[in-house]
Image (tube, rainbow, N blue to C red):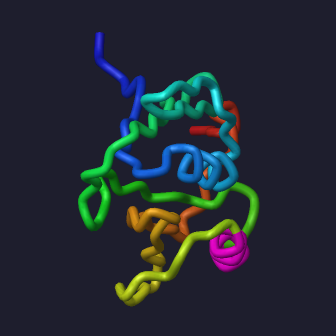
Amino acid sequence: MTSRIGDLVVKAQDPDRLSRFWCEALGYEISAKDETGVAISGASNAPTILFDRSDDTPVNGTLHLDLCPTDRSQADELERLLSLGAKRTDVAPSGSWHVLADPEGNRFCLMDKRIPKEPEDFHD
């Protein structure tokens, strides 16, 4: 038996704002909310992301995600993420990824690799 990730936990100064951004970016929905933070969930096999309220968020965040487009080009997904509130960082893009920041400055990468939207789309 192995383990799998159940939750990813991100410290956030404004869990509501950050959870809305990541819901739109990933196609997730808010699954729980209380005074300590917000949980968002996607497909049943995807980890839940918990945004815990914290005033001491590090400058570059506490988690780094690599996003891969599922149904569009990297360029189209870049424009979509920027329209949601992502910001370009001072890190120059490589040939295969862009380094962006979410509304609280947590850095993430947008890769050029496309992955299927649903697990059943994976074929060996």
* Residue at 53% from the left image edge and 77% from the top image edge: 87
**Is residue 26 found left or right of 10 in the rendered image?**
right
Residue 60 figure quarter: bottom left
- Please identify the quadrant where the C terminus is shown: top right
Residue 115 appears at what percent x and percent y? 60, 52
The image quadrant that residue 54 belongs to is: top left
Q: Is residue 13 above or below residue 75?
A: above
Estimate the x, y position of residue 22 in percent, counting from the top left. 58, 50
Was residue 20 drawn as part of the magenta stretch in this picture? no
**62 left or right of 53?**
left
**Image quadrant where residue 107 sits:** bottom left
Q: Viewed as shown, does residue 56 lie left or right of 124?
A: left
Is 51 drawn above or below residue 26 in the view shown? above
**Residue 79 within the segment the image draws in magenta:** yes
Quarter of the image that includes the N terminus: top left
State whether residue 113 is above or below residue 17: below
Q: Give the range drawn in magenta.
A: 74-83
Which residue is located at x 63 percent, y 25 percent? 31
Residue 70 in the image, given as x and y percentages of width and height: 68, 55
